[in-house]
Amino acid sequence: MKKILVIDDSETIRQQVKQALAATGYEIVEAVDGVDGLEKLRAIADIDLALCDVNMPRMNGLDMIAEVQRTGPKIPILMLTTEGQPSLIKRAREAGAKGWIVKPFKPELLVAAVVKLIEPRPAAA
């Protein structure tokens, strides 16, 4: 079972993401901000992907991505945020984010993005 870390200071958003992804068989680990997210990434070795908000207390999502890229682990990070400014999206991609989804999100689009980033692709015939 693939394991996904959801990093968001909103409990409601964490629950919505959990509901969307757990229904498709993913195990969800929750973190309340970037500091908590980093701690969980370092403590739980088998996390396959992180979903991260931008605006959070203690450490925002962009700073957290930069720290993960600098120190590891090397996993895909998908931003899930209310922010949609092109300059912010560009900064996140430059920091290492693999994608960007704006809240409120459609569960099927979230699942599709997660699958694209962490599920193995079948070999071409």
Image (cartoon, rainbow, N blue to C red):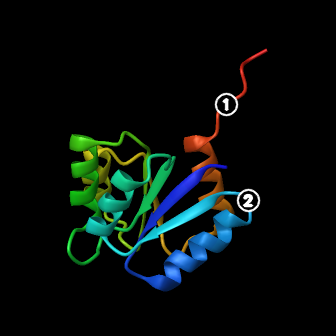
Q: Quadrant of the C terminus?
A: top right
Residues under numbered marks 1 and 2 in contact, where contact means CB atoms less than 8 Å apart: no
Element type at marker 2?
loop
Q: Tell me where residue 16 sits by quadrant.
A: bottom right
Residue 93 place in picture, x, y as percent: 32, 47
Q: How many marks?
A: 2
Tell me which residue sits at (31%, 64%) in the image.
85
Residue 94 place in picture, x, y as percent: 26, 44
The residue at the far front in this view is 43
Viewer-nearest residue: 93 or 47: 47
Q: Which residue matches tag 2?
A: 24
Viewer-nearest residue: 101 or 63: 63
Amino acid carrying label 1: it is: Arg
The residue at the far right in this view is 125
Q: Tell me where residue 105 sits by quadrant.
A: bottom right
Tell me which residue sits at (37%, 68%) in the image.
53
Q: Which numbered dot is residue 34?
A: none
Residues packed near mark 2 inside 10 Å, few (<14), some (14 to 19) or many (20 plus): few
Tell me which residue sits at (36%, 48%) in the image.
97
- Mark closer to the chain start, 1 or 2: 2
Residue 79 falls left or right of residue 91: right
Tell me which residue sits at (37%, 39%) in the image.
74
Viewer-nearest residue: 100 or 7: 7
Residue 95 place in picture, x, y as percent: 25, 47
Amino acid carrying label 2: it is: Thr
Q: Which numbered dot is residue 121?
A: 1
